[in-house]
Amino acid sequence: MKTKFFSRPDAGRLKKARILLFIAFAVIVFSISGLIFLKGYPVFAFTNFAGFVLFFYALLHPWSKASYYAMTIPVFLALLLLCIMNPSFFLNMVDVGKLPGHGAEDLAWVIGGIFFAGLIAGIFGVIRCLTFRYEDD
């Protein structure tokens, strides 16, 4: 029996979500290693952002419901606004005095970028779910 909230996902979509998560992890690991070893190339920052968008999209892909993606939009928007209004809220979790150079600013940009990637993934997921329907929905 299916429940209204987080029913059992379809096996085919679950397999596709696992593949998407694996690709997202590979892209994120590739981009982080590129950012560490080859400093100054913006392509690695863009691939990091794309990896997080794919990661957040793939997390809810097994259910493929626009309402689930729509619920993530205000959550990530609130976190992004919190990061913009008060970046020290997230930076207090890390001893930023030990970070070299502009480490605190870089960390704030990374955290804000992850929240923005979640916002984009939510919007993309809503559009994708409303555009493409599956036969079991």
Image (cartoon, helix red, strand yellow):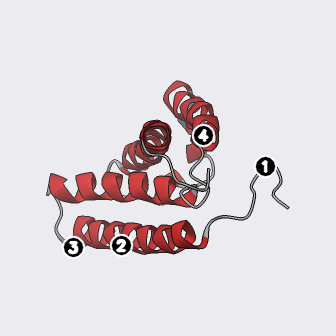
Whether residues under marks 4 and 3 lie with C-beta atoms below 8 angstroms apart, the answer is no
Q: What element does badge 3 sit on?
A: helix
Q: Earlier in the sequence, mark 4 or mark 3?
A: 3
Could you give the CA–CA distance between mark 1 and mark 3, rounded to whole angstroms? 44 Å
38 lies above or below 89: below
Q: Earlier in the sequence, mark 1 or mark 3?
A: 1
Which mark is drawn over residue 72?
4
Q: Earlier in the sequence, mark 2 or mark 3?
A: 2
Residue 84 shows up from this direction? yes
Q: What element does badge 2 sit on?
A: helix
Whether residues under marks 2 and 4 lie with C-beta atoms below 8 angstroms apart, the answer is no
Q: Nearer the viewer, residue 75 or 125?
A: 125
Q: Is residue 101 left or right of residue 120?
A: left
Which-is-in-front pick, marks 2 and 3?
2
The residue sitting at 54% across, 24% down in the picture is: 85
Please name the amino acid that badge 3 sits on.
Phe
Could you give the CA–CA distance between mark 1 and mark 4, rounded to whole angstroms? 15 Å
Which mark is drawn over residue 5?
1
The residue sitting at 66% across, 64% down in the picture is: 9
Instruction: Report which residue position mark 3 lands on.
Output: 37
Q: Is residue 83 left or right of residue 33?
A: right
Q: Is residue 71 left or right of residue 87?
A: right
Residue 97 shows up from this direction? no
Could you give the CA–CA distance between mark 2 and mark 4, rounded to whole angstroms? 24 Å
Could you give the CA–CA distance between mark 4 and mark 3, rounded to whole angstroms? 33 Å
Please name the amino acid that badge 1 sits on.
Phe
50 lies above or below 77: below
Instruction: Report which residue position mark 2 lands on.
Output: 29
State the image quarter where residue 10 is shown: bottom right
Q: Residue furthest top?
A: 85
Which-is-in-front pick, marks 4 and 3?
4
Q: Earlier in the sequence, mark 1 or mark 4?
A: 1
